[in-house]
Structure formats: structure tokens, C-alpha cells
Amino acid sequence: MLKTEKINNVIVVRFNNIDRFNALIVEPVKEQLKSFFNKPDTRLALNLEGIKFVDSSGFGVFLSILKTANNSQGQFKICNIRPEVVELFKLLQLHNVFDLYDSQEECIESFS
């Protein structure tokens, strides 16, 4: 369901053959993403390439992961977001809550 790679000390996670992040898959995704923050100072970039839709439970996972990251002195950022998904972030007023990046490269470079 998720593919993971490490680039410049940043864990990059992307969905594998999935175009909708919705209630059907949120629990296993949430648990897997949270597990990365068992180690403090983790830097995680979630690449949403190919995701065409995120429902409320998916946004709930993003918020939960952000809280988990902050509690473990980690960083959580999101990149490669399709315009229609960016519109959902804006509609929910979450574009100011998350660090959102157009490209994976830009996102990885932003980690301090």
C-alpha cells in the first residue's frame, strides 16, 4: 500500500497503486506512518503523487501524523499534491497548517 525510500536522511513515503486516500485505507496507513515517529527527530515527506481525492478521514490522518511528529520533535511535510487535492486543503483551511510543496525535491531540500 505504501512505498518508502530514504533520501538525504528524509523518509519519503508514497502510495502504491492507489488514487484515493479514504476511509477504506486510513487505519493501516495511519499506523504505518505513525510508526516512523517511534524514533525522535524523524523527517518524513508524504508524496501524494497520483492521489486524486482525500476524504475527511484522510485529512484526519494527516492531522494525527502532524501531531505525532511534533510530539517526537520530528517533521512531517507533504508534496506532489494534485490541484484538486490542494483545493480540498484550502477549503478545509489546512493549507496553512501543513508544509505543502509542489515537488518532492523542493520538499526534501526544505528539511533543516
Image (cartoon, rainbow, N blue to C red):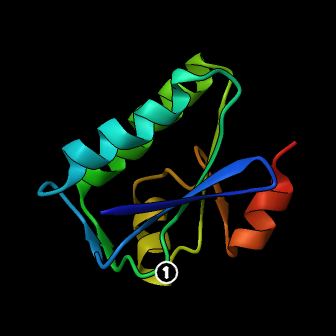
Q: Which residue is mark 1?
A: 82
* Coordinates of residue 96 in the picture (x, y in percent): 61, 49
Question: Please, what secondary structure does the residue beneath circle 1 have?
Answer: loop
Relative to 71, residue 97 above or below: below
Task: Using the image as rendered, state which of residue 7 and residue 88 is in the foreground.
Answer: 7
Residue at 68% in and 21% down? 73
State the quadrant of the C terminus: top right
Residue at 66% in and 33% down? 42
Q: Is residue 26 left or right of residue 78?
A: left
* Coordinates of residue 81 in the picture (x, y in percent): 53, 73
Task: Identify the image quadrant of residue 92.
Answer: bottom left
Residue at 38% in and 76% down? 51
Three-letter code for the amino acid on which mark 1 is drawn: Arg
Task: Identify the image quadrant of residue 74.
Answer: top right
Task: Using the image as rendered, state which of residue 75 and residue 84 is in the foreground.
Answer: 75
Relative to 24, residue 72 above or below: above
Q: Is residue 57 left or right of residue 70?
A: left
Relative to 52, residue 97 above or below: above
**Tally of numbered tags:** 1
- Circle 1 packing at 10 Å, graded few (<14), some (14-19), many (20+), is some
Residue at 81% in and 47% down? 111
